[in-house]
Each structure stands twice: as structure tokens, then as C-alpha cells.
Image (cartoon, rainbow, N blue to C red):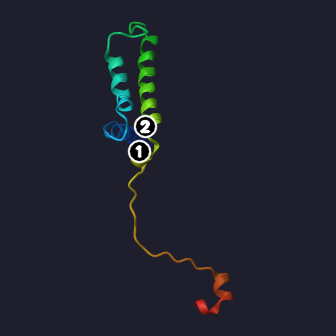
Amino acid sequence: MFLFRLINSISLIWKLMTDKRVPFIIRMAIPLALIYVISPVDFLPDLIPFAGRIDDLVALAIGLMVLLKLAPKKVVNEHKETKKTVIDGKFREEDDKKSDKNPESK
């Protein structure tokens, strides 16, 4: 289940980053966060064993939040919709009480 949600999230992020309806500055949030992670200049040096990676994770989280929260809701919802299989058919509901009261419906 987690892997399925992760793949869907990555797919949503990719679709939002390539969609021209999302403003350019919002689409640049993820690449800018990745540049910060790769760059040697950090708020907390990477030489500190645990704390050095926290600012990198925070930068990625902020980039993701900016993209997902500031992108137009209509575009996000459009890309979130899953393609569901539709099976054509007829649906009929029978109610015993209704058929007893109305003999013409038979």
C-alpha cells in the first residue's frame, strides 16, 4: 500500500511540474530544493552526523509543500483523479413492498 501511494505521489509531482497551468515559480520549488541539497553551502554543515542532513530534508519538504499547496487546486485535483474502469450495464432495484402495493408495475 505504501509503495502504491509513493508511486502515485511521485507521478502527481511529475505531472504538476510539467503542467504549464502551474505558475513557473511554483514549479521551480522542487528543483531549487534539490539544488540546495546538492550544493556544498548549508545552514548546518553536513559533517555533523545527524543534524547536517536535517536542513536538507527540511528544504525538500518545503519544496514539496510549496508545489502541492500553492498549485491551482483544479489542476491538482485533475491530476489526482485515477482512471477507473467503467463497466457498462443496467441496474435495476426491486423492492418487494413497492411491487405489492402497485400491481401495474409487474
* Residue 55 position (above or below residue 69): above
Q: Amino acid at mark 2?
A: Ala
- Quadrant in the rendering for residue 30: top left
**Regarding mark 2 in the picture, which secondary structure is present there?**
loop
On screen, residue 89 versus residue 38, left or right, reads right
Instruction: Pinpoint residue 103: horizontal percent, then vertical percent.
Output: 63, 92
Please state which of residues 77 and 44 is positioned toward the viewer in this rendering. 77
- Quadrant in the rendering for residue 63: top left
Q: Residue at the location (32% across, 17% down)? A: 38
The residue identified by callout 2 is 71
Which residue is farthest bottom?
104
- Quadrant in the rendering for residue 4: top left
* Residue 51 position (above or below residue 27): above
Instruction: Pinpoint residue 90: horizontal percent, then vertical percent.
Output: 45, 76
Q: Amino acid at mark 1?
A: Val
- Which circle marks residue 75 in the picture? 1
Please state which of residues 5 and 61 is positioned toward the viewer in this rendering. 61
Q: Residue at the location (40% across, 67% down)? A: 87
Please state which of residues 53 and 26 is positioned toward the viewer in this rendering. 26
Q: How many marks?
A: 2
**Placement of the C terminus among the 4 image quadrants:** bottom right
Query: Decide: marks 2, 1 in contact (CB < 8 A)?
Result: yes
* Label 2 CA crowd tier, 10 Å (few <14, some 14–19, many 20+): some
Instruction: Pinpoint residue 24: horizontal percent, then vertical percent.
Output: 34, 32
Instruction: Pinpoint residue 20: horizontal percent, then vertical percent.
Output: 32, 40
* Label 1 CA crowd tier, 10 Å (few <14, some 14–19, many 20+): some
**Placement of the N terminus among the 4 image quadrants:** top left
- Which circle marks residue 40 in the picture? none
